[in-house]
Amino acid sequence: MNTIVYAVSNRIASITLNRPDKRNALNSAMVNDLTNAFNQAEQDDRVKVIILKAAGEAFCAGADLSYLQQLQKNSLEENLADSTNLRNLFHKIYTLSKPVIAQVQGHALAGGCGLATVCDFCFSVPEAKFGYTEVKIGFIPAVVMVFLIRKIGDGRARELLLSGNAINADEAFEKGLVSRLVQPGDLEKTVRDFAEHLVNTNSAMSMKLTKQMIAEVQNLPLDAALDYAAAMNAQARATDDCRRGIAAFLNKEKILW
């Protein structure tokens, strides 16, 4: 996977965008490599938490415009197949059974902002810019808007998607796109420490079921959502992790997950 680098250490997988000369712009190869890497991390028993980061100055500049220009020669069916690959990547990250942390060391724009949006957490340096800039070039932020509206609501999503304006990290934090602002020299360690905190203090099964519920419950009417929640509650009680966790708490024992 030449466009990305995959590594595992201490139960944390690092997936690094590795086209720094192209500002880590997305093309077909990178989308496919990212999808394969997240599939690998999900199935890797050594991995409990995933960090998505990037080489170079930019996190991700969005779609590679020369690649988009080539796609304009494709048929509708060929373009649908290509856009479905991006749809599948975003869906994979959003619904992955393990937490994903975006480590944003530089600008995250268009599809790159979409990548950060679908992660569970986003740690960013103050200097980074965020924006869904597709309308500036006659394109549309189609796939990401499905997730963005869920994340920050209709009103804020409209403002960002229709204006196409890039915003600074402070504003992205205020709007809920960024989880935490971190100085550049501290970013790597802060993200790593947080990932290790999740590894050591949280049940993998509990995080998996919680992520599953977050993805599903928003689509359900109130009564159906509550029935689903009650069923998941009952299912969680029967897991080994729940038995271990409650026993450790009652016995005043420290549990390492």
Image (spheres, rainbow, N blue to C red):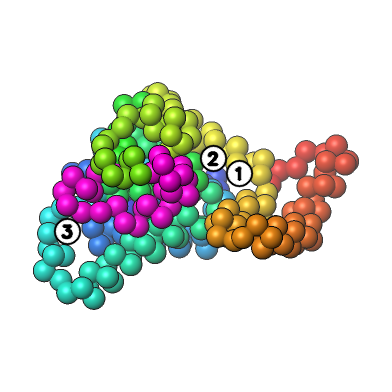
Tell me whether the residue at label 1 lies in contact with that at label 2, contact meaning CB atoms closer than 8 angstroms.
yes
Q: Residue at x 20, y 54 (%)?
A: 139
Q: Amino acid at mark 3?
A: Leu
Residues packed near mark 2 inside 10 Å, few (<14), some (14 to 19) or many (20 plus): many
Q: Secondary structure at mark 1?
A: helix
First in residue order: circle 1 vs circle 3: 3
Question: Is residue 100 positioned above or below 105 on the image?
Answer: below
Kindly tell me whether residue 37 is visible in this rendering: no
Q: Which residue is mark 2?
A: 195
Q: Which residue is mark 1?
A: 199
Residue 255's image quarter?
Answer: top right
Mark 1–mark 3 distance (CA, rounded to whole Å): 39 Å
Where residue 183 appears, x then y in whole percent? 40, 23
Q: Which residue is mark 3?
A: 68
Tell me whether the residue at label 1 lies in contact with that at label 3, contact meaning CB atoms closer than 8 angstroms.
no
Residues packed near mark 3 inside 10 Å, few (<14), some (14 to 19) or many (20 plus): some
Q: Residue at x 35, y 57 (%)?
A: 143
Question: Is residue 57 positioned above or below 184 on the image?
Answer: below
Q: Which residues are magenta?
A: 132-157
